């Protein structure tokens, strides 16, 4: 008997993603709710993070049992100071390093204690190098995606087709090409 697909329930108002996994007989294997906590909307609703959460039992920092609203605010702020974007923070939170950062926290810590634990973790060379590697990887991936989108847009415009979806950075180029075609047809 095949097991049922996991059921994912997303509550936008509360920022909670609940995933229920079923046994082959239809009974509940486990239910896991992950909350937005103190993470910003840009990080929490990032497609990479949401895909990670809904694909299975989330680990990394985002799935850590010691995660609190206060630690979320401190961690996101600290990662932003290191130059990471929403996407970079969202992906880093799913990493093994993110999981180890979660190990530094305890429930009931004061803001000062959380900040000290964060600084202590990022005071290690491995953590900083890991952060730089994630950032480099994301920037390279973004460049490849942009190059593919640029090539696809150029191909459509060369054939005289109208693009169905236009990335914000392509709007000027698309409008110019469409305007030129209108002028040619007059």
Image (cartoon, rainbow, N blue to C red):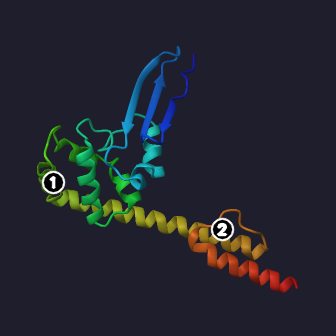
The percent coordinates of residue 43 (x first, y second) are 39, 53
In front of the other: 177 or 14: 14
Whether residue 179 sits left or right of residue 83 in the image: it is right
Q: Residue at x 50, y 33 (%)?
A: 8
Q: Residue at x 41, y 62 (%)?
A: 138
Kindly report which numbered mark, 2 or 1, lies closer to the viewer in this rendering: 1
The percent coordinates of residue 70 (x first, y second) are 23, 47
Quadrant of res 87? bottom left
Crowding at dot 1, Cα within 10 Å, few <14 / some 14-19 / many 20+, comes out as: some
The percent coordinates of residue 126 (x first, y second) are 20, 57
Most extreme residue toward the front is 13
The percent coordinates of residue 44 (x first, y second) are 40, 49
Crowding at dot 2, Cα within 10 Å, few <14 / some 14-19 / many 20+, comes out as: few
Residue, disc 1: 115
For the residue labelled by badge 1, is the local secondary structure a helix, a strand or a loop?
helix
Most extreme residue toward the right is 186
Whether residue 173 sits left or right of residue 90 in the image: it is right
Q: Residue at x 25, y 42 (%)?
A: 68
Residue, disc 2: 152
Q: Earlier in the sequence, mark 2 or mark 1?
A: 1
Q: Residue at x 69, y 77 (%)?
A: 175
The quadrant of the rendering that contains the N terminus is: top right
- Total marks drawn? 2
Q: Is residue 143 above or below residue 47?
A: below
Q: Is residue 151 above or below residue 58?
A: below
The quadrant of the rendering that contains the C terminus is: bottom right
């Amino acid at each position: 008997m095949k097991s049922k697909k996991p059921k994912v329930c997303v509550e936008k108002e509360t920022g909670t993603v609940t995933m229920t996994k079923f046994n082959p007989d239809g009974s509940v294997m486990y239910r896991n709710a992950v909350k937005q906590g103190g993470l910003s909307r840009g990080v929490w609703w990032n497609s990479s993070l949401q895909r990670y959460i809904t694909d299975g039992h989330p680990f990394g920092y985002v799935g850590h049992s010691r995660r609190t609203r206060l630690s979320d605010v401190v961690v996101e702020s600290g990662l932003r100071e290191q130059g990471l974007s929403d996407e970079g923070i969202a992906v880093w939170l799913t990493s093994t390093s993110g999981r180890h950062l979660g190990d530094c926290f305890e429930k009931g810590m004061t803001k000062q204690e959380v900040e000290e634990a964060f600084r202590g973790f990022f005071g290690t060379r491995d953590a900083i190098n890991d952060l730089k590697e994630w950032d480099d990887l994301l920037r390279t991936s973004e460049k490849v995606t942009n190059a593919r989108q640029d090539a696809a847009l150029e191909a459509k415009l060369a054939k005289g087709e109208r693009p169905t979806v236009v990335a914000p950075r392509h709007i000027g180029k698309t409008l110019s090409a469409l305007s030129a075609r209108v002028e040619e047809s007059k």
